Image (cartoon, rainbow, N blue to C red):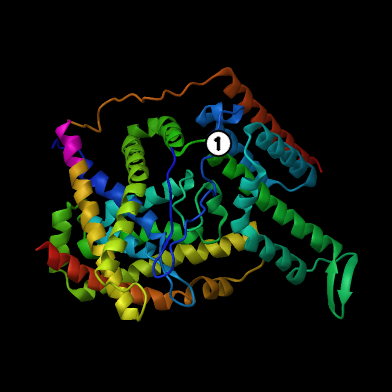
Amino acid sequence: MTANNKIRFLIPAALFAALTAIGAYIKIPLPPVPISLQTFFVVLAGLLLGSRYGAISQLLYLFIGLIGVPVFVEGGGLFYVLKPTFGYLIGFVFSAFVIGKIVHGSENEIPFARALQNLKSRSSKRIVLACAAGFVVIYIPGVTYLYLISQFYLGTGLSFYQALITGCAYFLIWDIAKIILIILFINIYIRNEK
Amino acid sequence: MEYIYELYAIGEMRITKDITLGKFFPGNSFVHRLDPRTKIFSTIIILATVFAAQSWPGFALWGILIIVIYRTSGIPGAILIKNLRPFFFIFLFTFVWHIVFLPASGEVFFQVGSFKITGPAISTAIFYCLRIALFILFSSLLTLTTAPLELTDAIEITLAPLKKIKIPVHEFALMTAIAIRFIPTILDEAEKLYQAQSNRGAKFTGALNERLSALLALTVPLLTNTFQRAEDLALAMEARCYDNQAQRTNFNRLKWNLQDAVVLLIGCVLAIVVVSIDHLS
């Protein structure tokens, strides 16, 4: 491997973009709204690829959707930027970055084996904290985008508080379920890797 | 390039998802044959103008243009309607909100008690809905007539100067190609794992904890296999001395023809006309 060759980082990031795409198709029918596995893979991207390549993988996911591959929940294409929910997808990029930063510290480019080692040595508390921070980071651009789109593009005077209620309060419960799933996942996955 | 995308609604019958939304529609029309760069630039110009549009004549001009383009590209009307469908609630929301909550003063069109609908409110509501529709139609035109990898190539070539300031444009294009290539493969794998684990007794329906553990039984091997794939691919590329710093050429060369220049020119002229109409009226 030459010093410049980043292929060992690029390919896992590309495949993680594909996994996030597939996460949109895997839905668990839970009342009242079916949850998809998308955010699950977003968090894993941050945990397993680290901050830089986690964020790149999510950026790639966004890009693929915008150039017309149907990887978003309702298809794909440039017109998706008009959906009020597009902000959450932007949030994915920041979320993976923040999670990577919290778990792996200042290490930017982490080989897969090193990421697993780091995860093994980190306390569950730190991982839970990282996941929670990651979910919060998804909502910040998500709600802001919802607000901006309805304010300036649809021309409706939706207040920020209303946007917050519609865009966030509802999903919080399932995010907690997802954090539990992620912790279980890490325990099993890393135990199997030994 | 034809992929089959399916939706796996775990615990329910599997539904084939009808994803034609914004998806490439193969064809050999004039619009399809244009250089993707032309299409990207003219789309950007038009979208900016539509976004800034403030008058009805400008809208009418874009409306006629979009109809003409869709007729020449040979894209069936059913696909257009399908593209607008996910926005149904946005249209409804915008329309109702404008009429009910933002009553403009003016001639009263309809009145029940203190609730009234005014003429100007209706016209603003229609104005906003039309603007959204135009935006959606123009932006889906780009992805309907250009294959994703063609677009990636065009963007890579356009952004190539950014390599000078260390932005890895080529690497990003490579990753795009890899990700698009592997989506169907991983999706297949997810389906196989889903069936295999159900056969072994994983319950994708049932109590919440059963579902969670079934989900783990699906995602753990999915992730392990994906990383194995990534490893194999990286190894194969390294063994063939792949170097991302190397100068490469593309199998499909993009060609900038006279027609591209003409189309781009027409786009610019129209944009200027619409903007000047806006400012005169």
Residue drawn at the location 39% of the way across and 67% of the way down: B10
Residue B250 is left or right of residue A140, and the answer is left
Q: Main secondary structure of the magenta part?
A: helix
Instruction: Locate residue B103: give its quadrant.
Output: bottom right
Query: Is residue B278 something one can see in this rendering?
Result: no
Packing grade of label 1 (10 A; few <14, some 14-19, many >=20) is many
Instruction: Locate residue B173: give its quadrant.
Output: top left
To which chain does the residue with label 1 belong? B
Q: Which residues are magenta?
A: B234-240
Residue drawn at the location 81% of the way across and 66% of the way down: B104
Question: Is B240 or B172 nearer to us in this picture?
Answer: B240
Residue B34 part of the magenta segment: no
Residue drawn at the location 53% of the way across and 41% of the way down: B143
Residue B12 is left or right of residue B40, and the answer is left
Q: Secondary structure at mark 1?
A: helix
Q: Pinpoint residue B47: horizontal percent, then vertical percent.
A: 61, 43
Whether A14 is drawn above or below B243: the answer is below
Question: Is B52 or B135 nearer to us in this picture?
Answer: B135
Residue B238 part of the magenta segment: yes
Query: Is residue B134 something one can see in this rendering?
Result: yes
Whether A144 is drawn above or below A58: the answer is below
Question: Is B277 or B16 nearer to us in this picture?
Answer: B16
Residue A177 is left or right of residue B268, and the answer is left
Q: Amino acid at mark 1?
A: Thr
Instruction: Check disc 1 and report the residue beneath it.
Output: B145
Locate the N terminus of chain B and report the quarter of the image it occupies: top left
Locate the C terminus of chain B and report the quarter of the image it occupies: top right
Residue extending farthest to the front is: B199
Q: Pinpoint residue B106: horizontal percent, then vertical percent.
A: 88, 64
Whether B243 is drawn above or below A146: the answer is above
